């Protein structure tokens, strides 16, 4: 039948579901008040039905003008307090309180409230025009209202008409948020973008920067939705989430306004409000836990495995509030108190703020910040919610054991176990080790027990307590944790009560995949080595890098320091709009001390002013060479010359003054710094510790699109095994081959989906200097992307898949390799830049990959990064293209009066090397090439030897690098070993000086 495939058919299906089983009533779009953005008739119908005596009194007092007067008060209340607060707490009208909604009580002991609850008017209205202008045609597909006040708007799209949820999102972003219906907090609280497969939500429209979050169930532990009995994969939304009781529960006990402190562009802290709507896994987990606790009563344990990026703070707050008021089927309270054990510093205030919004009650939450006596009083008196730290957990269980008639719910949040490092391992207050190797061994021995182990030890020592229920939130549960808290499946294996996997969090865009750009030192070296003979990579730069890595020794702190500092400056610092930071994870506190000294020395010697370094370790570290003892604050000095306290270090690291944090058993768990982009690992990692440590990089922020890990110690197979239990599709880029890049580039260009002229035109706009950018650039760039997209759409499905695969592979491989290899190929850089945004412009294929919604932001930040790199590769490449190789004369030099062999003899004698006659060839060639250099000849002829030597430092190094192929051993030793260099340099300079002047004297 005609019309079965369009949006109207989807509207029909949703409306029929809501009106049938959902408990909603149908609204009339013609009676919607566009000026005030609510439905007045539904509002007054609820008030009259639930408060008849009050309404009768008000009518008697105010007569015919009552409704208009109440509406004026309602509008003012909505403008000042917002929809959510007005619905929950009503409004005052001439001293009388008018309730605007009624929410289900926690128990059935008050039939009057239950009767009011049943009279709430949930109204679904289709095709609602929202612009006050009578001629305006713009409308929302669905409006969901409670007692006349708008709660949610909905935009529907249907694949059968060639549109998807992405088009709904674009539609919302194009809308003016100043229209009353869309004004933040004052009218509609949430906006849904929906198609038959996916759901996304936002609570604030702010144009193109509007951020939509997925509201999907997850599929095979990843993003998306499974099949649904209702036919549409998103039928759960209207059949379950929007069902009457569920919808009222979300409005009454989930939605809340969160105040967030953020840093403005000028560095000042500003407070911003955010309306929080639960994500699907949060809603599902909290409700299932509440239902299980109601059914099971006290004495059970539940493990909630929710990945980083899952919003555990909100989940814990919602669960605590609900458990504190939970009643069973007999209307008996299930728990006397809820104890939240966490190290999240702001959770107690967040809990108190949330509960005040829900109930306007104070004193429900008590934070234990004094002593055990305060905790004992709170437990004995039945304080509804008690917030304390993991250190006090043994006392909590001990005290509860003495109160057997009271029942407690304990919510444990061990994911944020320790920033201090003191709880994470049993270490001596003062580390005294004679060497780095010994320090590593000592601290590895103490690195076995963490907070999770301590928690389990306390529990097992006391046994299962019948008056105690545990709700344990964790990102990376250990086997022992699963055994204690997990539920048994049909095969008897323990599993979490609820799962939100790392894979789903990555695919939904809440965290980054830290293994996408993970590489071991061996692989890093192999990739750098591969550039040595690649004509598309500048020879000198490739050889410099190769020399830096070739002779790396496990305990050579100075060498690794050079590798890290130079990599950070070349590849990392321009990321995230120039704000990217890095962390070095060291194997002991003594290593951290040594690294801090080495970093400071190297940065000072090089005169770098763009890299600031902080170190983090606990207690005191004794330097075995000097006997001096160091603390963290003594080694960290701010730009004002004052020491930075341990408590002040996170804030200092957040500033633009510091870029690299050197950490020893500290800040490896519970440290959320979204600007962390790169991690250097110089510590043995395995299992949960590997996952927790590397996951410090996975936090997202605007402009952060990738991460990078350079691991000096571990094997890729071990890291892969560590991540496997938490993310089934772990991948690492260990097998990357630079040649693949050029093969893929050729394949893309041969497909002729996009043309060379379009790529060049796009990049001309993209890479324009700041002073030549215009407001039309964005449209111009997209104009050059569109023709290729049209050609792509004309391909058959098989050809589309083939091209999309090659495109995605090229973009990912270049992004990874460019963090390692010194590419200076302008064509490759331009192709990558074009392909990144061409891929975003292609029609979304839901069956292949999760939806990426941040293309606009990504484009903006990537462009800033590229421009900030200093007219980037394009100018550098031009300069490289104009260079010609040094021409070497073919005349054979006369034998030097002083034999070059004596240099070899000096080196062998002084350094114990075994260089042979064959190695003399290096110096022969070196002298010949240098003598052919006009600048060298000129300087030798007009300067005495000492002045000539002063001018030759860089020249000698460059000539050495050019000889890398002939003798890697000598050149690498020269570049990496200062003592070796200081021995060779004066001998070489002397031989060169004498050879040049001898040739001049002979008339050559």
Image (cartoon, helix red, strand yellow):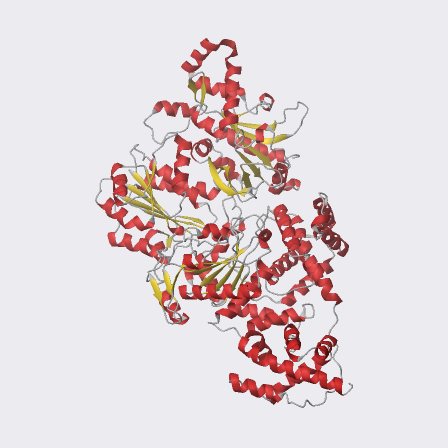
Instruction: Identify the image quadrant of residue 198.
Output: top right
Lateral position of residue 601 relative to residue 943, left or right: left
Q: Farthest residue toward the right?
A: 1003
The one of 410 and 165 positioned closer to us in this rendering: 410
* Residue at horizontal 34 percent and vertical 34 percent from the top: 363
Q: Quadrant of the C terminus?
A: bottom right
Lateral position of residue 624 relative to residue 802, left or right: left
Give the vertical position of 350 relative to 746 (above or below). Answer: above
Q: Give coordinates of residue 35: x percent, y percent.
A: 60, 23
The one of 838 and 675 positioned closer to us in this rendering: 675
Q: Is residue 335 visible?
A: no
Give the vertical position of 209 relative to 102 (above or below). Answer: below
Q: How many marks?
A: 0
* Residue at horizontal 53 percent and vertical 77 percent from the top: 979
Q: Give coordinates of residue 517: x percent, y percent.
A: 55, 60
Q: Give coordinates of residue 224: x percent, y percent.
A: 53, 47
* Residue at horizontal 49 percent and vertical 28 percent from the top: 81
Q: Is residue 493 visible?
A: yes
Lateral position of residue 176 relative to residue 461, left or right: right
Instruction: Identify the image quadrant of residue 573.
Output: bottom right
Q: Quadrant of the N terminus?
A: top right
Q: Give coordinates of residue 582: x percent, y percent.
A: 52, 58
């Amino acid at each position: 039948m005609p019309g079965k495939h369009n949006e109207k058919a989807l509207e029909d299906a949703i409306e029929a579901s809501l009106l049938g089983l959902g408990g909603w009533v149908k609204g009339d779009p013609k009676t919607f008040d566009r000026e005030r953005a609510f439905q007045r008739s539904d509002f007054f119908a609820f008030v009259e039905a639930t408060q008849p005596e009050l309404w009768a009194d008000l009518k008697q007092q105010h007569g015919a003008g009552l409704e208009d007067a109440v509406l004026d008060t309602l509008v003012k209340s909505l403008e000042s307090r917002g929809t959510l607060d007005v619905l929950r707490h009503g409004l005052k009208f001439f001293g009388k309180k008018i309730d605007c909604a009624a929410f289900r009580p926690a128990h059935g002991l008050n039939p009057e409230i239950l009767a009011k609850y049943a009279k709430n008017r949930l109204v679904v209205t289709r095709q609602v025009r929202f612009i006050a202008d009578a001629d305006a045609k713009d409308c929302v597909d669905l409006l969901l209202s409670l007692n006349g006040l708008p709660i949610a708007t909905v935009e529907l799209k249907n694949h059968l008409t060639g549109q998807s949820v992405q088009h709904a999102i674009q539609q919302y972003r194009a809308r003016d948020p100043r229209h009353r219906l869309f004004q933040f907090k004052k009218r509609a609280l949430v906006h849904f973008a929906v198609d038959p497969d996916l759901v996304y939500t936002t609570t604030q429209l702010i144009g193109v920067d509007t951020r939509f979050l997925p509201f999907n169930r997850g599929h095979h532990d990843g993003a998306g939705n499974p099949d649904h009995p209702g036919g549409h994969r998103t039928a759960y939304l209207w059949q379950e989430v929007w069902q009457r009781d569920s919808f009222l529960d979300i409005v009454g006990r989930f939605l809340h306004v969160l105040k967030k402190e953020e840093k403005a562009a000028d560095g000042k802290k500003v407070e911003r409000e955010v309306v929080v709507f639960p994500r699907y896994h949060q809603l599902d987990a909290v409700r299932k836990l509440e239902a299980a606790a109601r059914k099971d009563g006290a004495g059970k344990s539940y493990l909630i495995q929710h990945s980083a990026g899952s919003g555990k703070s909100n989940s814990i707050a919602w669960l605590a509030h609900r458990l504190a008021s939970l009643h069973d089927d007999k209307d008996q309270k299930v728990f006397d108190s809820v104890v939240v054990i966490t190290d999240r510093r702001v959770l107690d205030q967040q809990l108190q703020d949330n509960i005040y919004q829900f109930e306007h009650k104070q004193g429900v939450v008590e934070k234990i910040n004094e002593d055990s006596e305060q905790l004992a009083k709170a437990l004995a008196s039945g304080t509804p919610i008690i917030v304390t730290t993991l250190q006090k957990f043994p006392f909590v269980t001990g005290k509860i054991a003495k109160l057997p008639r009271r029942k407690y719910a304990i919510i444990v949040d061990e994911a944020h176990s320790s920033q201090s490092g003191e709880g994470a391992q049993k270490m001596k207050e003062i580390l005294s080790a004679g060497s780095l190797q010994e320090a590593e061994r000592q601290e590895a021995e103490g690195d076995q027990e963490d907070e999770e182990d301590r928690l389990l030890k306390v529990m097992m020592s006391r046994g299962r307590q019948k008056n105690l229920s545990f709700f344990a939130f964790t990102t990376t549960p250990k086997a022992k944790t699963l055994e204690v808290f997990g539920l048994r499946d049909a095969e008897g294996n323990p599993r979490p009560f609820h799962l939100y996997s790392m894979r789903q969090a990555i695919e939904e865009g809440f965290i980054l995949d830290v293994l996408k750009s993970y590489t071991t030192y061996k692989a890093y070296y192999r990739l750098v080595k591969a550039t040595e003979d690649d004509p598309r990579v500048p020879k000198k730069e490739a050889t410099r890098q190769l020399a830096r890595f070739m002779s790396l020794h496990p305990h050579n702190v100075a060498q690794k320091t050079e590798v890290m500092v130079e990599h950070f400056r070349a590849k990392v610092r321009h990321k995230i709009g120039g704000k990217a930071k890095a962390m070095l994870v060291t194997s002991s506190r003594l290593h951290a001390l040594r690294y801090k000294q080495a970093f400071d020395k190297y940065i000072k010697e090089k005169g770098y002013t763009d890299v600031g370094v902080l170190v983090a370790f606990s207690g005191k570290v004794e330097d075995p060479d000097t006997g001096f003892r160091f603390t963290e604050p003594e080694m960290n000095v701010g730009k004002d010359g004052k020491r930075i306290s341990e408590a002040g270090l996170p804030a200092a690291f957040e500033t633009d003054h510091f870029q690299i944090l050197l950490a020893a058993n500290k800040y490896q768990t519970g440290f959320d710094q979204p600007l962390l982009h790169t991690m250097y690992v110089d510590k043995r990692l395995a299992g949960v510790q590997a996952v927790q440590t590397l996951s410090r990089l996975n936090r997202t922020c605007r402009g952060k699109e990738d991460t990078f890990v350079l691991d000096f110690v571990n094997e890729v197979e071990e890291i892969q095994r560590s991540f496997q239990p938490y993310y089934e599709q772990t991948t690492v880029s260990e097998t990357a081959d630079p040649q693949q890049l050029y093969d893929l580039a050729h394949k893309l260009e041969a497909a002729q989906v996009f043309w060379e002229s379009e790529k060049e035109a796009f990049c001309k706009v993209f890479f324009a200097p700041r002073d030549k950018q215009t407001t039309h650039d964005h449209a111009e760039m997209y104009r050059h992307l569109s023709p290729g997209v049209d050609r792509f759409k004309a391909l058959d499905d098989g050809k589309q898949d083939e091209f999309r695969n090659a495109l995605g592979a090229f973009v990912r491989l270049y992004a990874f390799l460019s963090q390692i290899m010194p590419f200076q190929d302008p064509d490759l850089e331009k192709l990558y830049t074009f392909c990144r945004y061409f891929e975003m412009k292609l029609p979304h294929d839901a069956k292949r990959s999760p939806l990426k919604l941040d293309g606009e932001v990504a484009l903006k930040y990537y462009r800033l990064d590229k421009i900030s790199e200093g007219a980037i590769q394009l100018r550098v490449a031009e300069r490289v293209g104009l260079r010609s190789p040094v021409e070497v004369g073919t005349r054979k030099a006369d034998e030097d009066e002083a034999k070059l062999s004596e240099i070899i003899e000096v080196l062998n004698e002084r350094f114990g090397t075994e260089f042979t006659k064959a190695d003399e060839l290096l110096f022969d060639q070196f002298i010949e090439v240098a003598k052919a250099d006009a600048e060298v000849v000129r300087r030798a002829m007009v300067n005495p030897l000492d002045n000539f030597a002063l001018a030759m430092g860089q020249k000698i190094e460059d000539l050495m690098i050019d000889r890398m192929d002939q003798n890697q051993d000598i050149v690498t030793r020269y570049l990496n070993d200062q003592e070796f260099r200081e021995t060779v340099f004066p001998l070489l300079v002397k031989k060169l000086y004498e050879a040049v002047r001898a040739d001049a004297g002979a008339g050559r």
